Image (cartoon, helix red, strand yellow):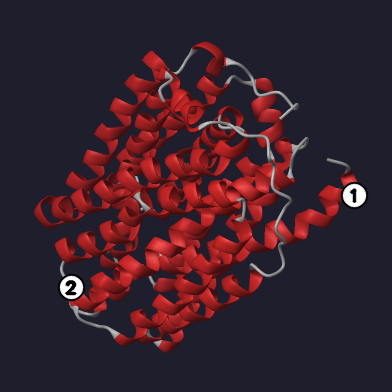
């Protein structure tokens, strides 16, 4: 893609990532604290978080298939954003467990359906310069940081009860942002459904999905209970916000340096390296809760546990799911990793936290990473062991 085309697309693509992950950054660190303020116990919090992530199993696949079939990615993106906004008002209205459970299901279904659609749109827009994906995607991380700090300050000053209204505001902005991007001309270069299943059946796909499920499973405790964990040790909401922000700043660094890293090292090496550092992270956190310095160091490892792994995995998915299979390729990755892995991780984390606290919950996360390392070492190889070229 000529530089002029890239410069025109850059602000449109990056702005959507910025606002989408602002909502994610507002939600993930503080929703557990909000549920706790409503009187829910650890098991109920884990169940609500599991529903929030669990809809990612189904939603991306349904919308991804339909977008590939109709060639109208942006039209369905706008609908998912609008319905996310609609359900966000239920978070303000409902305070009962069942009411919130149903609301979270609808809200998260459409929220999670949006991102794979936009990821597919982004890679199509970056045709010829896909190595610049990290420079676009890092604005999502910036948005996450802005939201974490802003919402943390809002909660400290105005109390946790303002939290659902902030989510409504951000959902509105996301919906408005979808009108800045335009539908691309549909490619009529057909790939049969058989070709999609042929790609899915390749051994490397199964192994990558298993590893992705396990690494997201391991994040279940972190996403559900990290803020509660810190709050129990006396950390203020503002300091908790900064600890989350440090993790995402480290993630931005990975996205910024993605091109030289992928040109120098093989994909398998980067995946294994990210898993090793993720294991270190989950072992450290429950052991050093009173050491701010060590907690800060553990947060910098988010660069590996999320940033590096995600960048490598999503490139591989785009590289092998071509043409009319692009949206479904992104969808199957999202639904398997963040959907199956994330939902199971959060559900198990709730029971583990209830029965054994931080040590048991993070211990289970660490064990999941050990299994992920075994799978990655044994089965992610052959052509996946190459360095990523600039050709896209």
Along the viewing direction, whichever of 229 and 135 lies nearer the viewer: 135
Quadrant holding the N terminus? top right
Quadrant holding the C terminus? top right
Q: Quadrant of residue 385 in the image?
A: top right
Instruction: Give the residue displayed 58% in from the left and 55% down from the top.
Output: 141
Mark 2 against mark 1, which lies toward the viewer?
1
Query: Looking at the picture, how far across and down is residue 306, in whole percent?
Result: 48, 43
Question: Badges 2 and 1: C-beta atoms under 8 Å apart?
Answer: no
Outermost top residue: 382
Which secondary structure, mark 2? loop
Query: Looking at the picture, how far across and down is residue 71, in whole percent?
Result: 62, 50
Q: Quadrant of residue 266 in the image?
A: top right
Query: Looking at the picture, how far across and down is residue 207, in whole percent?
Result: 38, 24
Q: Is residue 15 above or below residue 222?
A: below
Q: Residues within 10 Å of mark 2 (few under 14, many from 20)?
A: some
- Horizontal arrangement in the rendering, residue 12 relative to residue 303 (left or right): right
Residue 29 makes an appearance in the image = no
Mark 2–mark 1 Cα distance, whole angstroms, equals 52 Å
Query: Looking at the picture, how far across and down is residue 361, in whole percent?
Result: 21, 47
Q: Which residue is mark 2?
A: 40
Outermost left residue: 355
- Horizontal arrangement in the rendering, residue 25 relative to residue 348 (left or right): right
């Amino acid at each position: 893609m000529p530089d002029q085309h890239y410069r025109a697309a850059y602000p449109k693509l990056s702005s959507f990532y910025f606002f989408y992950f602002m909502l994610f950054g507002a939600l993930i660190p503080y929703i557990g604290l909000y549920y706790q303020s409503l009187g829910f116990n650890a098991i109920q919090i884990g169940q609500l978080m599991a529903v929030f992530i669990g809809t990612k199993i189904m939603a991306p696949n349904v919308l991804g298939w339909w977008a590939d079939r109709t060639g109208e990615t942006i039209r369905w993106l706008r609908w998912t954003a609008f319905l996310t906004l609609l359900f966000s008002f239920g978070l303000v209205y409902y305070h009962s467990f069942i009411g919130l459970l149903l609301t979270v299901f609808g809200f998260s279904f459409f929220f999670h359906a949006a991102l794979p659609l936009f990821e597919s749109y982004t890679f199509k827009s970056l045709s010829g310069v896909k190595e610049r994906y990290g420079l676009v995607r890092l604005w999502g991380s910036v948005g996450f940081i802005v939201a974490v700090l802003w919402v943390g300050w809002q909660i400290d000053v105005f109390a946790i009860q303002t939290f659902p209204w902030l989510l409504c505001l951000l959902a509105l902005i996301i919906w408005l942002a979808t009108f800045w991007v335009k539908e691309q001309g549909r490619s009529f270069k057909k790939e049969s459904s058989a070709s999609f299943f042929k790609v899915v059946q390749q051994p490397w796909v199964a192994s990558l999905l298993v590893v992705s499920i396990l690494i997201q499973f391991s994040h279940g405790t972190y996403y559900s209970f990290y803020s509660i964990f810190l709050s129990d040790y006396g950390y203020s909401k503002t300091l908790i916000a900064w600890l989350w922000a440090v993790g995402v700043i480290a993630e931005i660094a990975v996205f910024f340096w993605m091109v030289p890293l992928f040109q120098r090292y093989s994909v398998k090496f980067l995946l294994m390296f990210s898993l090793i550092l993720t294991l270190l992270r989950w072992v450290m956190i429950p052991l050093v809760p009173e050491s701010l310095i060590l907690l800060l160091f553990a947060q910098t490892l988010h660069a590996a546990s999320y940033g590096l792994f995600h960048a490598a995995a999503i490139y591989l998915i785009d590289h092998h799911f071509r043409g009319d299979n692009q949206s479904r390729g992104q969808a199957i990755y999202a639904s398997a990793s963040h959907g199956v892995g994330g939902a199971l991780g959060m559900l198990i984390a709730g029971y583990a936290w209830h029965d054994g606290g931080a040590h048991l919950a993070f211990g289970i996360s660490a064990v999941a990473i050990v299994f992920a390392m075994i799978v990655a070492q044994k089965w992610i190889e052959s052509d996946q062991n190459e360095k990523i070229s600039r050709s896209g």
